Amino acid sequence: MWRIWFAACFWGFNWAAVRLLLDGVSPWTLRAIGLSGGFAVLSSLVLITGRSMALPRASIPGVLIGGALNITAFNIFAVFAQLSMPTSRAAIVTFTMPLWAALFAWIWLREPIDRVRALSLTVGAFGLGLLSVAFWPTLARGGIPWGLLYALGAAICWALGTVYFKKQPMAGDPLAAIAWQVGVGAAACILAMLAFETPRIDLSDPKRMAALAYHIILPQGLVYVVWFGLLARVPASTAALGTLLIPIFGVIGAIVILGDWPTPLDVGGLALILAAVGGDALWRRRSR
């Protein structure tokens, strides 16, 4: 059980760490550094534990698709969401990803949507509606709610990658597979950094240096090891319930580290989304 709390805590607090870093590091550069460091940590762990980085040739499409959707697109959309809206709200909106995954699984995998899942999707939609209220003034002025779109983009890309891997499970060592996916993300972000921005790196503030070390070693590295250890020990439904803690820790981190307090509508939206995802996961668990 400690693995669930470990992963949720460090992934959740990573939202605040990234926001601190964005005050001194440009977004594409931050992702290039973070993912490159994550690849170094993960590949080192693979080799230290006596595993092989080699994967079957059939896994290459999965590595590329996972690296594009779950790593590159998710990380980039998430970082621009944080630049466009409060961190707590970005974390909450992004957490709608399990709901999108259920919807895409119905479309792509023909997984049935029973009454419980339909209710969960409806409740989650109401939660997203509450979160979108903050963007109504922008829409009324004819503007584009970029923060909302970026966060939804992160959630949708993660969900698409998840559904793809459900249809096409990847062979080989899972830790090596995620290491290569992070490597693909790192390469993509390095190329984009060189194409789209002049790198800006200011780590003169000790808090930023600490945040960078935290970001690379834990959320982009060791937490993946703990997470795969968790998946090998508990049912998938239990792990799914554990993900409910991530946005909670994300909001706590935003409050404690950034002083970013969620609005009542943010709290209401979070409660509805947690109820939607948690209710569905609990129902599936009890039905087995």
Image: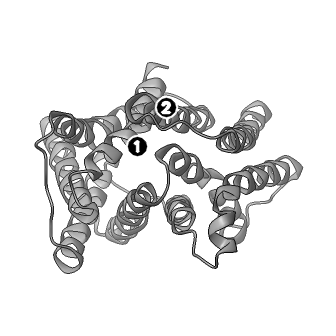
* Above-or-below relation of 249 to 61: above
Element on which disc 1 rests: helix
* Residue sitting at x 31%, y 59%: 181
Q: Residue furthest front?
A: 141
Q: Label 2 belongs to which residue? A: 249
Near-viewer residue (271 or 71): 271
Labels in figure, total: 2
* Residue sitting at x 47%, y 32%: 255
Q: Is residue 55 visible?
A: no
Q: Quadrant of residue 7?
A: top left
* Residue sitting at x 74%, y 42%: 272
Residue type marked 1: Trp
Near-viewer residue (44 or 28): 28
Q: Quadrant of residue 159?
A: bottom right
* Above-or-below relation of 223 to 109: above
Residue type marked 2: Phe
Residue 97 screen position, x and y as percent: 59, 54
Tag 1: Cα neighbours inside 10 Å, few (<14), some, or many (≥20)? many
* Above-or-below relation of 104 to 53: below
Q: Label 1 belongs to which residue? A: 15
Q: Is residue 203 visible?
A: yes
Element on which disc 2 rests: helix
Residue 76 screen position, x and y as percent: 37, 63
Residue 131 screen position, x and y as percent: 67, 52
Residue 202 screen position, x and y as percent: 13, 51
Q: Is residue 239 left or right of residue 258?
A: right
Near-viewer residue (45 or 273): 273
Q: Residue furthest top?
A: 2
Q: Quadrant of residue 128?
A: bottom right
Tag 2: Cα neighbours inside 10 Å, few (<14), some, or many (≥20)? many
* Residue sitting at x 48%, y 27%: 4
